[in-house]
Image (spheres, rainbow, N blue to C red):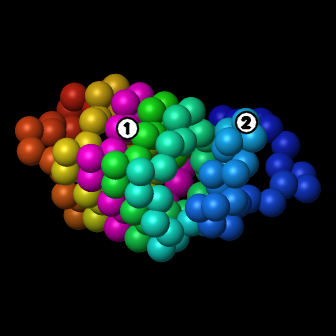
Amino acid sequence: MNSRSTEGYTPPENRAQLELRYAAGERYFPNTDLSGESLVGIKLDGADFEKHSWFFDADFSRASLRGVSFRGCNLKCVNFSAADLTGAILELAAIESIKTNGATLSEVKVRGATFYGCELGENVELPSWNW
């Protein structure tokens, strides 16, 4: 559980704001809503969206998301095709209708996540995902 204070915090509202703040060294982005946002090819290694962030219909294809925490987030209709999710944390996330074709999924943690209608890449077996 993350105990960081969010008092006075305003989450990024679009890709440009997120990239600018990430480039400035910020990594903690709770309560972010980037629904419908094109995040194709974005690099967010080590970012933390833990709790209450929404990514409905977001496109993370070809993104670098190594070690990103989506813990407790809503990931609905998200495209992770060809993204690098090595070591990503999806624990306790609500995951619905995501695409992971060609994604790197080694060491992804999904304990307690709920899945519905997900399109997984060839040869991906959920038990290998650190239940």
Q: In front: mark 1 or mark 2?
A: 2
What residue sits right under mark 1 in the picture?
85
Using the image as rendered, state which of residue 107 and residue 117 is in the foreground.
107
Secondary structure under the numbered disc 2 in the rendered image: loop
Residue bounds of the magenta highlight: 72-89
Amino acid type indicated by mark 1: Leu
Q: Position of residue 127 (x, y in %)?
A: 21, 32
Q: Quadrant of the C terminus?
A: top left
Amino acid type indicated by mark 2: Gly
Dominant secondary structure, magenta: loop
For the point 47% across and 59% down, which residue is it? 39
What residue sits right under mark 2 in the picture?
25
Using the image as rendered, state which of residue 67 and residue 126 is in the foreground.
67
**Is 2 on the left or on the right of 80, as rendered?**
right
Give the quarter of the image for residue 77. Answer: bottom left
Name the outermost residue toward the right. 8
How many C-alpha atoms fall within 10 Å of the one at disc 1: few (<14), some, or many (≥20)?
A: many
